[in-house]
Amino acid sequence: MRIFTTTALAALAVTLSGCGGYKPTLNQGLEPVHQPVVSRTDYVIDVAAGSGGLASGEAQRLAGWFDSMRLSYGDRISVDEGDAYGDAGARAEIAKMASGYGLLLSDTTPVTAGSVPAGRVRVIVSRSRAEVPNCPDWSRGSAELAGSTMSNYGCAAMSNLAAMVANPEDLIHGRDPAGGTDGFTAGKAIKSYRTRPLSGEKDLTKETTTKGSN
């Protein structure tokens, strides 16, 4: 298994610290200096492809790898077949295995080192994480004489944003709004709520007992 890690800044404009370590920065604007940083780690395994699927024993090996990775919500699984025609059978089998973890195969494949060997497919598990470096930041005193925000300004809001976002990569390139909200699907919950009979309309439950008191 090989591991590749990439890191990207979520903000377009961030004041960078010097090479000698973190230094507090005067910030006389409203944009926080502290911004979420998104890092992505790609875990790679190559499995042999057979006739119309994975080769004998490879499904069990891949399943064991998935278990060791502890796949969960937020993980992205992609398959690199190596050639332009791909291997539909192997991809379908891997997709079925991924569905057991509640995950779908990604339509895009990240770039990894090296080419896919002939007769094999590359399975990639990508994990993204968002965090705000150097927070909390109390490097500067609360007495402000330079018209700057406090050194800890923005840490709470940006740390909460990094913790709550479902897909950290949305902080970098956003999400395509195509499709928007399905009004019909959203309306079903409202209709169910409105048509449900009120609990007060039902008769009270009657309970009787034949046991006497002591």
Image: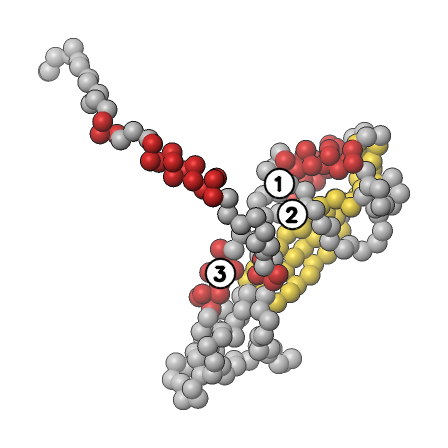
The picture places residue 98, in percent across and down from the top left corner, at: 66, 37
Q: Are marks 3 and 1 in contact (CB under 8 Å)?
A: no
Residues under numbered marks 2 and 1 in contact, where contact means CB atoms less than 8 Å apart: yes
Q: Which residue is mark 2?
A: 76
For label 3, the residue is 161
Circle 1 residue: 103
Residue at position x 20%, y 23% in the image: 204
**Disc 1 residue type?**
Leu
Mark 1, residues whose alpha carbon is within 10 Å: few (<14), some, or many (≥20)? some
Q: Check disc 2: other Cα within 10 Å, few if <14, some if 14-19, many if 20+.
A: many
In this rendering, position of residue 133 left or right of residue 114: left
In the structure shown, which secondary structural element does the residue marked by tag 3 occupy? helix
Snapshot colouring: secondary structure
Instruction: Pinpoint residue 164: horizontal percent, then vertical percent.
Output: 49, 55
Query: Which residue sits furthest right?
Result: 118
Q: Is residue 191 above or below residue 43?
A: above
Q: Secondary structure at mark 2?
A: strand
